[in-house]
């Protein structure tokens, strides 16, 4: 289905009611036009019988909310009962021949794969710091903050996916597979597309390198636990092979110019997976999800007896080494915001899901599942260990118990397969902007690992990653997707973007008149204020 859409240049070309006619040329259906949002079989006067009524954004949202399946695939587009499934429209519903079947459909993601990918993408080093954070902020504020951010993330994913749906309808291109940068270009123009690409690359790059650092160090610790020693090549100030037998999460210390065995193993695995497409990473994601389940099960079995002993030593106080309300309740805000970094992956996952997949249900299940895991591991860790360590794996490894070591090493291997997802997302968005697939793949996959190769042992670079996350990640994961949603629900896309202040006000008014647009505006304002508050708190701690 090829679509071209343009307004009539002549103001005299109106229908009998004086309304402007917008033409959509459907090849091989040139007799179809669109007038005021309705598809008509037109005569020479630009009038005709309605064939396809395009619902407003509010109607689409109501249809999706009323869908018991919870997916976006059931939005009705044809008064005769046809539906838009996923990102495709049946040509036969427009009077043509048989439907078009995507030969790659069988390789795309179903509900189960979407859930697993979302859970794996949100799992990362942020989980390891949760026990200390909950101990400092208090169990009650911590659990509430995590639950609130899980709800906000669920709604943001839903709204962004619905705005992708609305964008396809507004552009009459149902076959289009939209990435994050595509949405910014369509709704805000090429300048904002570049801004989005920079922010997305910084966000995903910082997440990837943070995960690289934890993976490499933990793999070295695992090698020491299993063989008694791990090795590394130091390249400055002298080129030499060194070893360590220190049973810690930083066996070679910090601020070292070296490449360890753990780093090389993680790099070989992740670069190989990163060169594949997202759909080709399905099996590694299943393995990662299984290892994550092993981490949770063995971790709970290891921590629970410690928790019971701590409670008994505290005369039955179930808070143990934590408290209901801690000394620093605001410390959970940043962690809660940044532990749900899944929204930026929604466009790519939405493009790669199977026809008819219940995308909304899948993302909702994944977000609440990871939230429960955060609360379970974070809460038990806070009660048992308090704020004694920045990383829950540290006391678990020091205990030298079988369950503790099993849980720690299961977590390490669980976060390695999701690492290439970040680099694949960078490559896909670079490709959309540069239109150079090979270069985009090289930049997206090899640049993060090249930076990590020389800087992952540096404390200063670690601080840079932390501040990149604070200043960029939240706005990329929440503010920009909700901007896209607001614009998509305010009217047809415009190459000029927002333009003047008057145009900006018009967009806000138009979005406010739409149910989904109103929700995206309110959420965007609330989340953006929280993000600025997080920045303020971190600046005050300097």
Image (tube, rainbow, N blue to C red):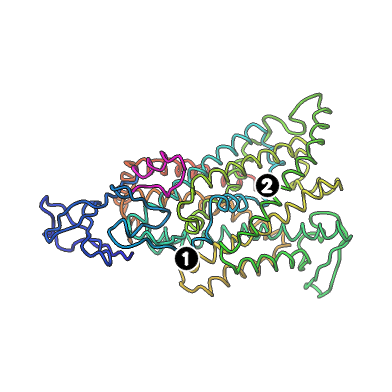
The stretch drawn in magenta includes residue 296? no
Q: In this view, does 206 lie to the left or right of 175?
A: right
- Residue at 33% in and 60% down: 91
What range of the chain is rendered magenta?
Answer: 58-76
Farthest residue, direction top: 315
Farthest residue, direction front: 98
Q: Disc 1 on helix, strand or loop?
A: loop
Q: Disc 2 on helix, strand or loop?
A: helix
Task: State the residue position of label 1.
Answer: 103
- Quadrant, the N terminus: bottom left
Q: In this view, does 145 lie to the left or right of 327?
A: left
Task: State the residue position of label 2.
Answer: 127
Label located before the other in sequence (1 or 2): 1
Q: Nearer the viewer, mark 1 or mark 2?
A: 1
Q: Which of 507 and 216 is in front in this view?
A: 216
> Residue 463's x, y, as percent?
66, 56
Q: Is residue 454 visible?
A: no
Q: Is residue 314 left or right of residue 175?
A: right
The stretch drawn in magenta includes residue 68? yes
Mark pair 1, 2: CA separation? 39 Å
């Amino acid at each position: 289905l090829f679509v071209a859409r343009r307004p009539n240049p002549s103001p005299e070309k109106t229908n009998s009611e004086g309304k402007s006619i917008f033409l959509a040329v459907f090849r091989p259906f040139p007799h179809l036009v669109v007038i005021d949002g309705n598809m008509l079989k037109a005569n020479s006067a630009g009038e005709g019988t309605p064939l396809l009524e395009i619902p407003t954004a509010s109607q689409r949202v109501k249809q999706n909310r009323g869908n018991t399946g919870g997916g976006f695939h059931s939005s009705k587009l044809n008064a005769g009962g046809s539906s838009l499934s996923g990102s495709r429209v049946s040509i036969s519903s427009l009077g043509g021949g048989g439907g078009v079947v995507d030969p790659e459909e069988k390789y795309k993601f179903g509900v189960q794969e979407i859930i697993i990918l979302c859970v794996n993408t949100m799992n990362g080093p942020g989980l390891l710091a949760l026990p200390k954070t909950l101990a400092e902020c208090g169990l009650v504020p911590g659990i509430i903050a995590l639950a609130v951010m899980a709800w906000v993330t669920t709604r943001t994913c839903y709204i962004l996916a619905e705005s992708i749906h609305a964008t396809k309808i507004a552009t009459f291109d149902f076959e289009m597979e939209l990435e994050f940068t595509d949405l910014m270009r369509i709704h805000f123009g090429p300048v904002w597309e570049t801004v989005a690409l920079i922010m997305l690359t910084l966000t995903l790059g910082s997440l990837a390198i943070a995960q690289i650092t934890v993976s490499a160090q933990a793999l070295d610790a695992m090698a020491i636990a299993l063989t008694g020693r791990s090795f590394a090549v130091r390249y400055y100030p002298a080129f030499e092979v060194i070893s360590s037998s220190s049973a810690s999460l930083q066996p070679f210390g910090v601020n070292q110019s070296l490449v360890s065995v753990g780093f090389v193993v993680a790099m070989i695995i992740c670069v190989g997976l990163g060169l594949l497409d997202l759909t080709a990473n399905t099996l590694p994601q299943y393995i990662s999800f299984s290892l994550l389940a092993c981490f949770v099960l063995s971790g709970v079995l290891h921590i629970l007896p410690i928790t019971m002993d701590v409670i008994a030593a505290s005369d039955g106080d179930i808070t143990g080494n934590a408290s209901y309300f801690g000394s620093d309740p605001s410390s959970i805000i940043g962690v809660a915001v940044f532990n749900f970094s899944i929204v930026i992956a929604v466009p790519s996952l939405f493009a790669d899901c199977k026809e008819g997949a219940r995308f909304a249900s899948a993302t909702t299940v994944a977000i609440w599942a990871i939230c429960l895991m955060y609360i379970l591991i974070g809460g038990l860790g806070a009660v048992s260990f308090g704020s004694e360590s920045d990383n829950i794996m540290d006391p678990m490894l020091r205990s030298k118990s079988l369950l503790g070591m099993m849980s720690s090493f299961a977590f390490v291997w669980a976060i390695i397969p999701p690492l290439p997802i970040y680099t694949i997302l960078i490559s896909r968005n670079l490709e959309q902007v540069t239109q150079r697939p090979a270069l985009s793949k090289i930049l997206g996959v090899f640049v993060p690992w090249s930076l990590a190769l020389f800087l992952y042992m540096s404390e200063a670079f670690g601080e840079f990653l932390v501040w990149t996350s604070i200043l960029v990640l939240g706005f990329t994961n929440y503010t920009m997707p909700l901007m896209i949603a607001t614009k998509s629900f305010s009217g047809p896309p415009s190459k000029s973007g927002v333009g003047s202040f008057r145009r900006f006000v018009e967009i806000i008014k138009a979005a406010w008149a739409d149910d989904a647009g109103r929700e995206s505006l309110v959420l965007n304002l609330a989340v953006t204020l929280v993000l600025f508050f997080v920045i303020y708190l971190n600046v005050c701690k300097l």
